[in-house]
Amino acid sequence: MCPYVDMIKNNQNQKARHEVSAGGLVFKRTPKGVFFAMMKDTYGKWTFPKGHVEKGETTEEAAARETIEELGLEEICLLEPLGKIDIWFRDKHVFKGATIHKDIFYFLFSTSENAELDPQVSEHVIEAAWVPVNQVMKKSSYSDLVAVINRALGLVGRVK
């Protein structure tokens, strides 16, 4: 690795806030096919629900809670962990310009074929939609989710 990259990361580690979040990719099987729930965030980008892990909560519990809250779903079933992504960004909302280092744990959930989405504006969700399985990767706005999405798509093909 380039020593300058290591130096920058070390400097970020000293100044950055570390956060842990968890989220979920939810799918449903219908007579018309498999669909994933996606949401548009406050940046106008299509993604999946996630949020901070609260004290005393496991990542699985946080992922389920955030997914239900943000999408307005009534019931989901935890199936598999999908992996963790590690991101760095400058906060524009709460810590105004602070560098944030965030670990985000994602999980795969299923729901009933007649589940409806009721996106929660209070949870910073602009809109939500059921996206056909073959369009999920194309609709996703964040490249760091590619591995998580690929894992979910592979698992959904095996889950009945």
Image (tube, rainbow, N blue to C red):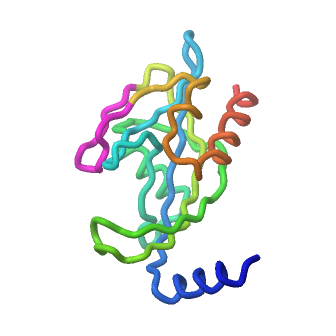
Image: 87 above or below 47: below
Residue 27, by quadrant, is top right
Q: Is residue 99 above or below residue 80?
A: below
**Image quarter hosting the C terminus:** top right
Identify the residue at image location x=47%, y=58%. Answer: 62
- Say which of 151 and 81 sits in front: 151
Residue 143, percent from left and from top: 57, 48
Q: Is residue 21 left or right of residue 146?
A: left
Percent of width and height locating residue 14? 51, 89
118 inside magenta stretch: yes
Q: Is residue 19 left or right of residue 43?
A: right
- The residue shown at (36%, 68%) is 91
Q: Could you tell me which residue is drawn at 29 percent across and 50 percent down?
A: 123
In the foreground, 26 or 103: 103
Q: Position of residue 52 (x, y in %)?
A: 42, 64
Picture residue at 56% right of the left edge, 34% below the top: 110
Q: Is residue 136 magenta?
A: no
**Magenta highlight: main SS:** loop
The x, y position of residue 68, in whole percent, is: 40, 44
What range is drawn magenta here?
Answer: 116-128
